[in-house]
Image (cartoon, helix red, strand yellow):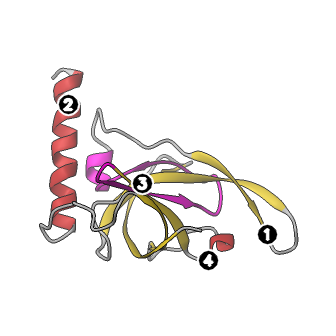
Amino acid sequence: MGKRVAALLSLLALCCVFLAACGGKSSEPVLPDGVYTVDVTTGSSMFHINDTCDGKGTLTVRDGQMTVHITLASKNIVNLFPGTAEDAAKEGAALIEPTVDTVTYPDGMSDEVYGFDVPVPCLDQEFPVAIIGTHGNWYEHMVTVSHPEPAE
C-alpha cells in the first residue's frame, strides 16, 4: 500500500477514534480562537503533567482546531500518538515529536523535560493518547482537557 493511502487511512482511523472518544459529538470547539489555561488529567503516574505545572496545560484554539501543550516530568516518553496504542503501532502512523521544555522547581533548580502539542478533539471528555517510551513499548492512556480560562 502506498504511503499516501496508508497516511489517509491512519487519519481516517484517528477521526473515528476521536469521534467515538467524544461520544460521537463534533470536534468543533466551543471556544473562540485564542490561548487558554486548562486542566489536563491523564489518570496515570507513568504519563503525567510536570509537578511545576500544577496539572495545567496551554490550550490553543486556531481556525477551529484545539491543541494542548503539556509539559511532562522527564524525557522518558519519546513520541506520542493521538489515538489508540494499536493504531500508533501501525506503519505510517503520524507520531508527535516532543518539544524540549525548561521547568524551574521551587528550590530554584531547572531541568529540561519533554512536552507535547496534542490535538484535542473535545473538552471535558476523555480521549485516547498512546505514548512510547525509551523501552520501545506503546501504552495507551485516556486524557481529559477541561476548565478553559483565557491565558493572561
Image disc number at residue 118: 3
What residue sits 44% from the left and 44% below the top?
A: 96
At 16% across and 37% down in the image, what residue appears?
A: 9
Classify the position of the N terminus by image quarter: top left
Q: Name the residue under label 1.
A: 105
Q: Mark 4 points at which residue?
A: 54
Answer yes or no: is residue 69 visible. yes
Q: Which of marks 3 and 2 is in front?
A: 3
- Amino acid type of the residue that numbered disc 3 sits on in the rendered structure: Val
Mark 4 element type? loop
- The stretch in magenta equals 63-88
Counting from the top left corner in percent of width and height, residue 104 is at: 78, 64
Q: Which of marks 4 and 2 is nearer the N terminus?
A: 2
Q: Which residue is identified by label 2?
A: 6
- Above or below residue 115? Residue 47 is below
Gap between marks 1 and 2, in whole Å? 43 Å
